Each structure stands twice: as C-alpha cells, then as structure tokens.
Image: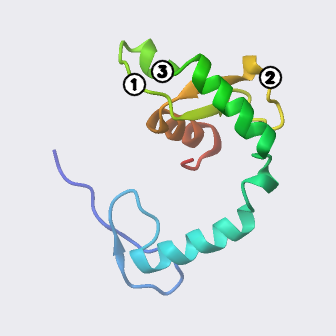
Amino acid sequence: MPNRLKTACAYFGCPELCEPGQRYCDKHKRQYESVYNKIRGSAASRGYNKRWQKIRAMVLADEPLCRECAKHGIVKAATDVHHIDGNVANMDRSNLEPLCHECHSRKTAAENGRWG
C-alpha cells in the first residue's frame, strides 16, 4: 500500500511540508492552536463550571466504563463525558454518556469536524 504524500503547510508563505493528515508544520501548528485556544475561551466560559464537574463525576461513578467500547465487547475505563446532543448546557443525565478519551475524540471530530 503506497504511503500518503506530505502536503504544504497551510500557513501562507510557509515552505515546510507536513505529515499526512496535518494542516500545519510544527512551528505554525503551535501558533494556530494558540490563536484557536484564545478564541475558544476557558472551560468555564464554555459551560464547564463547578456544576458540570459534579455532574461529570457522578456520571463516571455511576457508569465507569466506556459505553462505545462496550458496544464492541471492549472493557475500557471511561475518562470523558460526552453530550449526546452536542449542547453543553443540556446536562440532563439522559444526554450524557461516559466514554474513553479516544472514543470521545472520535465522536467530537465526527460531529464538530475537530478533535476534542
């Protein structure tokens, strides 16, 4: 199977090549992420406050295994809590599912187009 080719960095004027699947070279990836994180805001400003921390802890205590992995017969600890409808303000227990970090990142990327 042939390897995928490296691509040019998406930063305007940068001549560096990036690994397949990467948009920016190492230098510009850090710059992009820095700007992204400033725009994104803090966890608290995005709705992940003390109330969320309590609810998250309860969900993980009630259901400590990754729900997605369990569907495939894999036993793996849940580390993240996913909002099924994508609305962080909806903290109803039926809208929350425990996932391992890998499954949560995969679902977030599929739903939002960005790894989370």
Give coordinates of residue 37: x percent, y percent: 65, 66
Callout 3 secondary element: loop
Look at the picture and state if 87 lies above or below 16: above
Give the mark nearest the N terminus, 2 or 3: 3
Q: Identify the secondary structure beneath mark 1.
A: loop
Residue annotated with mark 1: 76
Numbered circle sitting on residue 65 = 3
Residue at far left of view = 1
| Distance from Cα at disc 2 to Cα at disc 3 | 19 Å
Q: Which residue is mark 2?
A: 92
Residue 90, how many percent across, how many down?
82, 30
Q: Are the two marked residues, 3 and 1, in contact with CB atoms closer than 8 angstroms?
A: yes
Determine which quarter of the picture holds residue 89.
top right
The residue type indicated by label 2 comes to Asp
* Depth check, front residue: 72 or 46: 46
Mark earlier in primary sequence (1, 2): 1
